[in-house]
Each structure stands twice: as structure tokens, then as C-alpha cells.
Amino acid sequence: MLNDRVVLITGGTGTFGKKCTEIIVQKYKPKKLIIFSRDELKQFEMNQQFPESKYPCMRYFIGDVRDKERLHRAFHGVDFVIHAAALKQVPAAEYNPFEAVKTNIIGAENVINVAIDQGVKKVIALSTDKAANPINLYGSTKLCSDKLFIAGNSYVGRDHSVFSVVRYGNVVGSRGSVIPFFLKQKEKGVLPITDSRMTRFWITLEHGVGFVLNCLEQMVGGELFVPKIPSMNIMDLAKAIAPECKTEIVGVRPGEKLHEVMVTKDDARRTLEYKDHYVVQPDFQFWGSRFKSNGGTPLSEDFEYNSGTNPWFLTIAEMREMIET
């Protein structure tokens, strides 16, 4: 699907963007692969890893999704957009709320409008489990972003741009996540634990990128894709990383949940189940025909995809292997 196409990744110098770039240049032959981000140093460093001399398809655009005019220039001639740009640190979003709003909400609106104006064929946006029943600002801005991208399909009118969303849990080893934090704290001999009951969904970076690219190929517009992935208890995670360390209960931080949810009970009645993922269908009834031939199985109305009740839990050995690889 990506061969001889022009692909643009917003936030392309982040953890996801770099791995996505690596997989795309290994498996496909895009006409252009545009890395769009606002950090010139990260673009310089990424250019050392993926130089245009070795990868002629590579392009590096400095810009911000807050800047609609720059997006107009960057999206010219683009076929597919993978929207990964976001402010995603929960404490930073709480302390700088409107900065998160500018990037995660207004930036999403800019991506949608410019994609329509420039005739982009497909846009797939990355979301988070924190957007389901959000209790912090980051999750709230991402929920709003999700709603904007889904509604973009009705906003587009007679043009041919389509929009979908991918929602998944914590990425093993991503910047700012608990695993790099625990690895650093390991040197001190004590791991701070918020609550011993806490669980999270986990996905490897490779799995996350592969899932997004599969969804980009399958999407018809309006879907919210959710992969079936394992959960893990925070105490088991601590044992997987540093079994020799003591643990210290420090209490749940503001904006944190004990368990994360990716498909809420309210969404269950609109959700279809597939072998390795779920699809939450849009509220707009006139889109129903798009999904009739996709073969999904409806869920019961009391279904909830919750990290605490998830039937698939990682063992300590499995998590240790994921971290090592």
C-alpha cells in the first residue's frame, strides 16, 4: 500500500515515529517519507540514522501542528498521514493545560482541515487508553482529538479524505514511561510504587507500529481501532525489572487510575470484535454500511476492556523478555 506513495508522520522524531520510519523503509518503497516535527536537534539526529543519501525517500520538515500554514505546505501532494504528534506527559499537561490543548486539540483540528484541503487520502491518528473515561487533562484532550478525527469523516463532504483512530496502552520502553524510570531507580535500590493493585495494558513498539500500519491499510473511515494486548500488575513489573530492589508505596498520583480502560461499557454497544482487535464504530448511523462486510462480532452491552479484568496477563518472564528485546 505504501509503495510509490507519499507518507507523512507528524511527531516523526518521537519514539513511535522513529520505529515507524525504520519499518517503512525496510518493508516498503515509498515515493517520499516526510518527518514532520518541531525539534531541529531530533531531526538532525534522525537524519544521521536515516540519511537521504541512503534513503532517497526521506524528507525532514521542521514545523508544528499548531501552525496551520506550515501544515498546508507540508501536506502538499501527501497520500497518507500518520498523526503521532502530541503532548503526552500527564504531569506536564496538568501544569501547562492550554499548551496540551493547543497541540492535542487545535493541532488535531489543523491536521483534519489541511488534510481535506490538500486531498490527503487517509489520516490515522494515534490515541491512548487514557482517552477512555479520562480523569486527567492529557486523556481529556486526546478524547477530544479522537472525536474530532472521527467526525472529520462527515465534515469532509464530497471529498475523499478518510480519518480513523488507533488506541492502545503503554509502550514498553517509550520515553517517559515507567520502565525507563524503574531502570533508573534500580540503581538506588528502591522502586516507588503508586498502588500495589495497579494494572496497565502493555504493547511493544514493533507491535504498535505494525498494528497502526495494518489499520491504515484496512481503514474505511470512522473506526477507532483497539488491539488485543496483555496487562500486567505493577508489582510484577517491578519484579521483572529489579527483583532485588525494595518497593515503597507512595500513593496514586493526581490524574492516575488504578486500571486503564480501552473499550468502555458505553462504547461496547457500538463495538465489533475481531481475532486480534476491536473496532468501535462511529455514532453516525449513516456510516453503518461501511462496516457490514467487515465480519466483526458485536459485543454484549456490559462488556468493558479493562486492564484489571483483561483475561490476558503477562508473566514476569514474558515482560523481562520484552524489555530485553
Image (tube, rainbow, N blue to C red):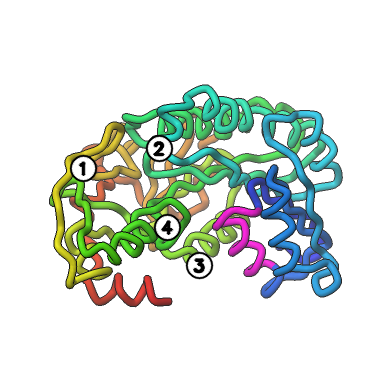
Residue drawn at the location 68% of the way across and 46% of the way down:
39
| Quarter the C terminus occupies | bottom left
Image side of residue 150 versus residue 189, left or right: right
Asked if 79 appears above or below 206 in the picture, the reply is above
Foreground disc of the pair 4, 3: 4
Disc 4 and disc 3: Cα gap in Å? Answer: 9 Å
Structural crowding at the residue carrying mark 2, measured as other residues with C-alpha within 10 Å and reported as few (<14), some (14–19) or many (≥20):
many
Q: What segment is highlighted magenta in the picture?
A: 13-24
Q: Position of residue 234 (x, y in %)?
A: 21, 56
Foreground of the two, 292 or 191 = 191
Q: Amino acid at mark 4?
A: Val
Q: Earlier in the sequence, mark 2 or mark 4?
A: 2
Q: Which residue is mark 1?
A: 258
Q: Position of residue 181 (x, y in %)?
A: 35, 56
Kindly state the secondary structure of the residue where label 4 is placed.
strand
Disc 3 and disc 1: Cα gap in Å? Answer: 26 Å
Give me the disc on residue 90: 2
Q: Earlier in the sequence, mark 1 or mark 4?
A: 4
Q: Which residue is mark 4?
A: 171
Q: Earlier in the sequence, mark 4 or mark 3?
A: 4
Q: Quadrant of residue 53?
A: bottom right
Kindly state the secondary structure of the residue where label 3 is placed.
helix
Disc 2 and disc 4: Cα gap in Å? Answer: 15 Å
Q: Earlier in the sequence, mark 2 or mark 1?
A: 2
Q: Amino acid at mark 1?
A: Leu
Structural crowding at the residue carrying mark 3, measured as other residues with C-alpha within 10 Å and reported as few (<14), some (14–19) or many (≥20):
some
